[in-house]
Amino acid sequence: MAPSTTRRDFLKAAAAGTVLSRCWRTAKASAQDGNHPPNIIFILADDLGWAELGCYGNTFNETPNLDKLARDGIRFTQAYAAAPVCSPFRAALMTGLYPVRTGITDYLRPDDPKHLATNYVTLPEMLKSAGYTTGIVGKWHLTGYANHGAKETGPGKHGFDEVIVSENRGIGAGSYFFPYHFNQEIRQRLPGREYLVDRCNLEAVEFIERHRDKPFFLYVSHYAVHTRLNGTPELVAKYEAKPNAGKGFQAPRNNPHLAAQLESIDRGVGMIRDKLRELGLSKNTIIIFTGDNGGEDKVTSNAPLRAGKSTLYEGGLREPLIIHWPGVTQPGSICHTPVCTVDFYPTFAQAVECRPAPTQTVDGVSLLPLLKDPEAPLDKDTLYWHYPLDKPHFLGGRSAGAIRRGDWKLIEFFDTGKTELYDLSRDLSERHNLAEDKPDKRRELLEALHTWQRQVRADFPAGQPKGR
C-alpha cells in the first residue's frame, strides 16, 4: 500500500504545481469522454542480453510471445541501458535522469547507505498525478534494506500504490523457488514447487484484472535471468535435449537454464496480452519490453557485440526493446535510432499529456516521433555514460565513462586514462580502436564527455581519472 501523505509528499506535489493540475484535468476530461489515457505495462528482464530473443536472431531460445509482440509493434536495434549494471538503470527509469545525477552509479549492496532520494518526482508519482493506479511486481533494487541495517526506501515511498513480490533483503545469487530468501514474508500461492517467474506472471495478470476500470501503470520487474540461473525442471530438460545445448548452470553458450527462464518470462507476456484481450483493454494499453543491462558473458554470448554486463562495450549496454501501442506503432516496424533508458520518462509523460514537474530535470527525450515513424528525426544526437568504480567489477568491468555521438563511440578508462574510439557503423563488435588513427574525432568526443561530466558534477574515485 502507498505510504501516508507526508510533508515531503506535500511539498513535492506543490512544487509540481500547475503541471499536476493539468494532469488531473486531462484525466477527468478523458473520463467524461468515456475513455481514459492509455494503460502502461512495462516488462523488464534482468541481465537479458541483446541477442537472446528470437526476433533479435536467436535460434536456440524460444520466445514466441515476444516475437509476436515485435511483429505487432516496433523493435529497436540500438536501445541502450543508462548503465551496465542494475541499480543505476532503475534510477534512470524512475527519474528520466542519467544515473550520475541521482548518485547511483553502481549496483546497491544490501547494506548500502545509498538509495533513490525521495525528492525526485518519480515515474509512478508523475503518473499518479494523471489519475493512474500504479503497481510494481518484482525487483526494486534502489535501496539498501533495513534487514541489513540500511535506511530502506522501497517502492511504496516512490509512488507505487501496490508493491507485490518485492525484496526486503539482498537479492544476489538467485532465489527462484519458494521460499524466497530475498523476502521471507512472501507466502506461496501456486501449487507444487512455486516458481518465481510464474508467481510474478500471476500477480501481473491479477493486477490488470483489479484495475481494469481506470488507467494503470504496471511495472513487471522480473528477477530472471539474473544468475544463479535456475529454470523449471521441465523447461530445462526441454532445452537440454536440443542440438548444441550447453551443459549446466554456467554454460557459456545456449544455456538451458537461461533459455528456460526466458521462456517463463515469455509465457507471462502471453498471459498479459490474453488478459488484456479478455477485458477489452488491448487497444488502449502500451506494452514495453526491455532489459536493464547486457547479459553476463559467463553464461551467454552477446555476439556480435563485445563483452557484457559491467562493461561500457556494446555487450554491456545494448538491450532488446519492443514497444506495442495500438494506433501509434506500425506493426512490424524496426527503428535503428539510438535511444536510452532516460527516454522512457518523457515518452510516458507525453503519452498521458502530462509534462514533468518543473522541479525535475529530465535528460531524455520523448520517443513518440519514432513510435509513429521509425525514421523520424529525434531531438538528440549524443548519449553519455558515467561508471566510476573503486575497483574492477567481478565480471570484468572497469571504471570508465563513454559517449556516443552519431556512429562514433569513445570510452575513457578512469583507472589508466586511456581511450578507445570506435566507428559502430563499420565495427559493431568494437574490435578496431581508432583513437590514434582519428585524433580529431577522439579529441572532439573526449572534450564533449568532459564537458558533460562537469555539467552533471560527476564524482570520481580517489586517484581517478588519470591522464587529465
Image: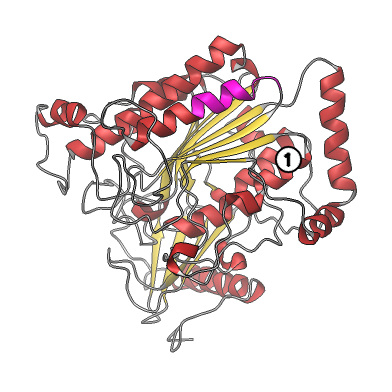
Numbered range of the magenta stretch: 204-213
Residue found 62% across the figure and 74% down from its top: 451
Three-letter residue code for mark 1: Lys
Would residue 121 be counted in the magenta stretch? no
Would residue 143 appear left or right of 320 to someone viewing this image? right
Question: What is the x, y in percent for residue 237?
Answer: 13, 29
Looking at this view, name the residue that lies furthest to the bottom.
463
In terms of secondary structure, what is the magenta stretch mainly? helix
Question: What is the x, y in percent for residue 417?
Answer: 40, 81
Q: Is residue 380 visible?
A: no
Question: What is the x, y in percent for residue 191?
Answer: 31, 25
Residue found 40% across the figure and 73% down from its top: 399
Q: Secondary structure at mark 1?
A: helix
Compared to residue 427, the image places residue 138 above or below, namely above
Residue found 57% across the figure and 24% down from its top: 208
Would residue 157 appear left or right of 228 to someone viewing this image? right
Front-most of residues 441 and 68: 68
Quarter of the rendering occupied by the N terminus: top right
Q: Which residue is mark 1?
A: 128
Q: Is residue 318 visible?
A: yes
